[in-house]
């Protein structure tokens, strides 16, 4: 039995199934491949697997367009494979967290097929339709993937609303029947032994297109509290909402300790700091470390004792952190460990994205090698706007979602041991040097470092409970902080860059301290940090 609030001590590992492990030679990862690798994850020490969508889908947006919430896409296996994964993970004390897309379905979902048959169809009101005239859009709202949010249905003389692809029509949460269907489906999965859910773009379910509202609609928290009452509160689950529009006040509602909504929320304020303000995500600027420290401090202190943080650098939508804010060349190992140290010392539930524990890097593909729908749309759009291919590639090397989606690098054999077939997306050519097999038994590897960080969180209550205070707040090269709980202090000291830096140890941190972990094998000088050097002390 899990203890109450077990997720506070937990570390979650995100798997992007199509890129994790292929058991059939199809070139596509699958559920049986994940089952094969459960012992690897047990060795790492994680408590739960967040599984990116495996439900039945036409795969227009890599599974975030679900056509059957209660079946598994044949690409990944069968429902019985899923049941076996849940059971075999549970034996290893690993819970399965499913990725649910409740803002929209696929246009191939039976509900939508019915909805577009006629205005009188009982399913018509499961989606958002507007009467209109072809060519005269209901309003000027734009889709996240580019173009209008409205799609014409000639047989109805109506437009339907979609915030993403036209193959992802938005569900109408105003309709209680829709909500009831969703709750029944979630409870069905809970009964199958799932131990949590990640809710995709959940802050968009209360949209009001007539008022141009797509995010944080007025009824959002009413809907979420009903969702929690009808489903999550039946079991001891870990639940996390993806909320790009979350600020601190909203996050307090999402992660209220009374469990009325979620265990925690994914907020992305720190993730936008290397994007030019007011521009597209492709317009990149160097990271300002002071801003990063300010933002993370705000969240650490703002949710302390009244909410809960999700801690992450990477996911399936974000570039590899060692390439983004570390140094993936001369100091790949040191900087990957340094970034891990900063994150895992904080209060919240850490999420490790597959391959992060190996220091996997971004890929430098040719334009033809990219597979991601957002990336392909960007290439087309920027070419039409006169951008050079070189400038397009520079943005993609930094920010394409395919950077995170290259196949997992298991060993130095053909295709990195991911598949015996042709991989759906090319393997990063550096797999000969960067792979799990070479790291698992190396005590100085990034894998071993993550393993140790995970073990420390379970051993020392200060990781879970301690309050947060920046050390050297004005220093432009150091990211350092303390966590304090019941007279014990954890001191995290990290050099964020590739230049050596000298420090004067603050009075309150002098004296006897135990070095819990460090990314260099020896400490040359207590007062000097080498490039990307990271240390954790216990006082």
Image (cartoon, helix red, strand yellow):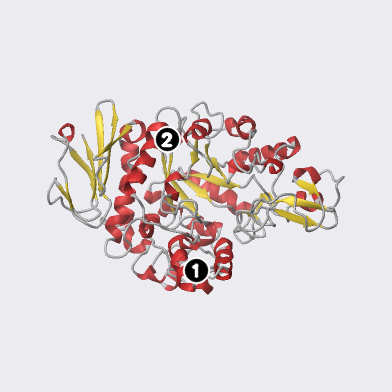
Helix, strand or loop status at disc 2? helix
Residues 497 and 452: in front is 497
Would you say 91 lies left or right of 139 here? Answer: left
Would you say 95 lies left or right of 505 here? Answer: right
Residue position for label 1:
419
Residues 385 and 503: in front is 385
Would you say 51 lies left or right of 183 here? Answer: left
Residue position for label 2:
8
| Residue 347 appears in the rendering | no
Whole-number angstrom distance, CA of label 1 to CA of label 2: 35 Å
Pair 1/2: label in front: 2
Q: Are marks 1 and 2 in contact (CB under 8 Å)?
A: no
Query: At 55% from the left edge and 60% from the top edge, which residue is drawn?
Result: 30
Q: Residues within 10 Å of mark 1 (few under 14, many from 20)?
A: many
Would you say 70 lies left or right of 404 here? Answer: right
Query: At 14% from the left edge and 46% from the top edge, which residue is drawn?
Result: 527
Indicate whether 402 appears above or below 70.
below
């Amino acid at each position: 039995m899990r203890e109450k609030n077990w997720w506070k001590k937990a570390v979650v590992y995100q798997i992007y199934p199509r890129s994790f492990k292929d058991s059939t030679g199809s070139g596509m990862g699958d559920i049986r491949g994940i089952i094969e690798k459960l012992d690897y994850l047990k060795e790492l020490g994680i408590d739960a697997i967040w599984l990116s969508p495996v439900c039945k889908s036409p795969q227009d947006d890599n599974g975030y367009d679900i056509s059957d919430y209660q079946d598994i896409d044949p690409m990944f296996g069968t429902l019985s494979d899923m049941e076996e994964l849940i059971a075999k993970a549970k034996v290893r004390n690993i819970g399965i967290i499913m990725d649910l897309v409740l803002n929209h379905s696929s246009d191939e979902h039976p509900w939508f097929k019915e909805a577009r048959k006629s205005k009188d169809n009982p399913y018509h009101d499961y989606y958002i339709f507007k009467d209109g005239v072809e060519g005269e859009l209901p309003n000027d709202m734009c889709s996240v993937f580019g173009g209008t949010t409205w799609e014409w249905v000639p047989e109805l003389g109506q437009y339907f609303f979609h915030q993403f692809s036209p193959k992802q029509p938005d569900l109408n949460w105003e309709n209680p029947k829709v909500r009831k269907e969703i709750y029944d489906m979630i409870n069905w999965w809970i009964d199958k032994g799932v131990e949590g859910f990640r809710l995709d773009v959940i802050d968009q379910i209360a949209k009001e297109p007539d008022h141009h509202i797509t995010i944080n609609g007025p009824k959002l928290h009413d809907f979420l509290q009903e969702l929690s009452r009808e489903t999550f509160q039946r079991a001891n689950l870990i639940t996390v909402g993806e909320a790009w529009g979350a600020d601190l006040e909203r996050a307090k509602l999402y992660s209220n300790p009374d469990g009325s909504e979620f265990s925690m929320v994914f907020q992305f304020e720190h993730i936008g700091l290397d994007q030019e303000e007011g521009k597209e995500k492709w317009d990149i600027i160097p990271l300002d470390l002071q801003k990063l420290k300010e933002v993370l401090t705000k969240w650490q202190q703002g949710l302390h004792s009244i909410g809960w943080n999700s801690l992450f650098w990477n996911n399936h939508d974000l570039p590899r952190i060692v390439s983004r804010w570390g140094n993936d060349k001369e100091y790949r190992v040191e900087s990957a460990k340094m970034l891990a140290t900063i994150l895992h010392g904080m209060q919240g539930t850490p999420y490790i994205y597959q391959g992060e524990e190996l220091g996997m890097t971004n890929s430098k593909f040719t334009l033809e090698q990219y597979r991601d729908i957002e990336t392909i749309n960007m290439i087309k759009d920027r070419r039409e706007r006169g951008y050079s291919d070189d400038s397009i590639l520079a943005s993609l090397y930094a920010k394409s979602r395919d950077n995170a989606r290259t196949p997992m690098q298991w060993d130095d054999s053909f295709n990195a041991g991911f598949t015996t077939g042709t991989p759906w997306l090319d393997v990063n050519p550096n797999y000969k040097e960067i792979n799990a097999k070479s790291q698992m038994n190396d005590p100085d590897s990034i894998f071993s470092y993550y393993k140790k960080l995970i073990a420390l969180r379970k051993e020392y209550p200060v990781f879970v409970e301690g309050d947060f205070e920046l050390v050297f707040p004005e220093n432009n090269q150091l990211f350092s902080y303390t966590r304090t709980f019941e007279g014990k202090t954890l001191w995290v000291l990290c050099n964020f860059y590739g230049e050596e830096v000298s420090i004067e140890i603050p009075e309150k941190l002098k004296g006897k301290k135990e070095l819990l972990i460090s990314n260099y094998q020896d400490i040359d000088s207590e007062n000097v940090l080498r490039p990307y050097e990271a240390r954790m002390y216990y006082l």
